[in-house]
Image (cartoon, grey):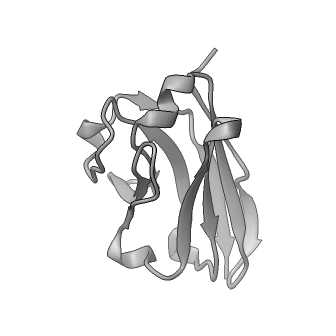
Amino acid sequence: QAPLLESGGGLVQAGGSLRLSCVHSETSFNSVAMAWFRQAPGKERDFVAAIRGSGGSTIYADSVKGRFTISRDDANNTIYLQMNSLEPEHTAVYYCAAREYVGLAMKSRDYVFWGQGTQVTVSS
């Protein structure tokens, strides 16, 4: 079983919203930082947002501040990414990732566990 499983992607019109979910199979992930990254066609994988382990601290890429919200429900081994006011430039495969540490990080190399990704397509 994959350690991380994303869902919630799909096709949405510009201005719409989506909520992505990432269910993890390891209760130990509740105490580590987790994050969302995205990768558009032909581009590198970029940081979107992260949430600290066992706490509420979060960080966001400047491009999504005020538009996206990351949260976690440790009772259900799930993290979320609420995405509002979506635009075509948000089209990408969105990946969930987990660190081995509590602290926040914004670089993909700092995350050890990855999901398979979920496609988000925003039409104009």
Name the residue at 62% across, 77% down: 86
Counting every numbered tag in the picture gives 0
Query: Where 79 sits versus 5, above or below?
Result: below
Which of the 4 quarters of the picture holds residue 50? bottom left
**Residue 79 placed where, x, y %?**
60, 47
Task: Give the image location of residue 70, x and y in percent.
Answer: 53, 61
Relative depth, front residue between 64 and 56? 56
Horizontal arrangement in the rendering, residue 19 relative to residue 36 (left or right): right
> Percent x, y for residue 40?
46, 57
Q: Quadrant of residue 20?
A: bottom right
Q: Quadrant of the N terminus?
A: top right
Relative to 18, residue 7 above or below? above
Q: Nearer the viewer, residue 47 or 70?
A: 70
Decide which of 28, 37 is in the foreground and name it.
Answer: 28
How far across and down, in percent of the image, does residue 93 sit? 54, 51
Q: Residue at x 56, y 22 (%)?
A: 26
Q: Seen in the image, is 39 located left or right of residue 120?
A: left
Horizontal arrangement in the rendering, residue 68 relative to residue 63 (left or right): right
Which residue does the image show at 65% across and 63% down from the upper left?
Answer: 121
Q: Which residue occupies the foreground of this view, 81 or 55? A: 55
Write the residue at 28% across / 53% down. Answer: 106
Quarter of the rendering occupied by the C terminus: bottom right
